[in-house]
Image (cartoon, rainbow, N blue to C red):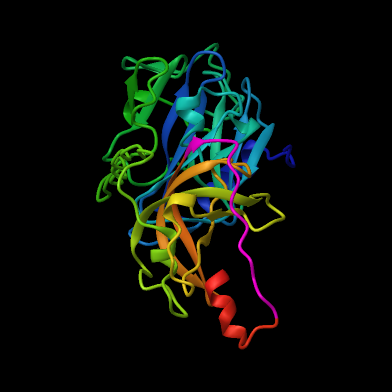
Amino acid sequence: MFKTKITPLALVIASLSAPASADLIISEYIEGSSNNKAIELYNNADTELSLEGYTLGLYSNGSSSIGNSIDLTGTLAANTTYIISNPSAAAAILDIADETSTVTYYNGDDALVLTKDGVIVDSFGQVGVDPGSEWSEGGVTTVNKTLRRKDSITTGRTDSTAIFDPSEEWEQFDIDTFDGLGSHTGNGGTAPVPDPEPEPLEPLVCGAEKTLINAIQGDGSASPLVGTLVEFEGVVSADFQGDEQLKGFFVNSLAADIDANPLTSEGVFVYFADTDVNVGDHVRVQGTVEEYFDATQIGSVSQVAVCGTGLAAAATKITLPLANATDLEAFE
């Protein structure tokens, strides 16, 4: 969004009115091909930081007035990063971005200023100066490159109108280098430990050894298998997977699996909507047995496989009146 204009004099006064923040700094700058642009911010503190009051502003083509900006919100954990991406950047950037913003519509000759409640805490480039197409010193250039802040830099550059030599605080990498985005270390900080890749699931095998639905239901008021991971098969008898519905489906036992015990139920509800099923589908389900409002169901479902289609669940006869309402437990 566009903001009120700020003059260079106001920026200088703001920078002199308070010490530099040692907490939030600009830690990575990506000026890549096409729209591959992103800014990484880093919380250099050992405590969580509120982002309220922080603004990142863009000064284009030597302008002394802010042209575009983004107000930050939320919180940032200690020694972690916050990534602002161009909305049309490559998937490698967008997949780890915390936010997209048009403040990233910059080129190598534009300046960026990070403020907290109007006070400058860090800057990139030189406000009020158009260097041509780039700032370039000491083998480090701001156009068509990825720049990472040196780990030794723990406080921001608060004089945004000072001569800008990118080689003093930045290390250069080739165009479209994204592998360091989101993992700035910094002095005293630690790179976040990546989440381990989940173990691949073994595909379900229809007709393999299974738990029967009547064994899941049991002949008591609650399942004897609560908390147990099970695999079972049956026929979908009702489909309520919609967002405004139960977000799951009912499964009845296959005809060959029905037992002779009148106290056990041959149906169970599966709380799962990620795999679309239809009435009449023969399915194999892997999930955990739960009790929900005194009814047995399958939750924490990891997989559903459709083994066949076009089947019908056999109807179960109920004789009324009931001697006791608990007699319905067998038909749950």
* Rendered residue at 57%/22% (across/down): 129
Residue 8 in sight? yes
Which residue range is magenta in the image?
A: 306-320
The N terminus: image quadrant: top right
Q: Nearer the viewer, residue 237 or 95?
A: 237
Q: Taking 167 as reference, is 326 above or below it? A: below
Q: Taking 188 as reference, is 200 above or below it? A: above
Q: Taking 81 as reference, is 259 above or below it? A: below
Q: Which residue is most to the bottom?
A: 323
* Rendered residue at 26%/46% (across/down): 187
Q: Nearer the viewer, residue 251 or 257?
A: 257
* Rendered residue at 32%/43% (across/down): 208
Q: Is residue 318 magenta?
A: yes
The C terminus: image quadrant: bottom right
Residue 141 in the figure: left or right of residue 253:
left
* Rendered residue at 58%/18% (across/down): 130
Residue 160 in sight? no
Majority SS type along the magenta span: loop
Residue 290 in the figure: left or right of residue 239:
left
Residue 119 in picture, x, y percent from top left: 56, 51
Q: Is residue 194 magenta?
A: no
Q: Taking 205 as reference, is 47 above or below it? A: below
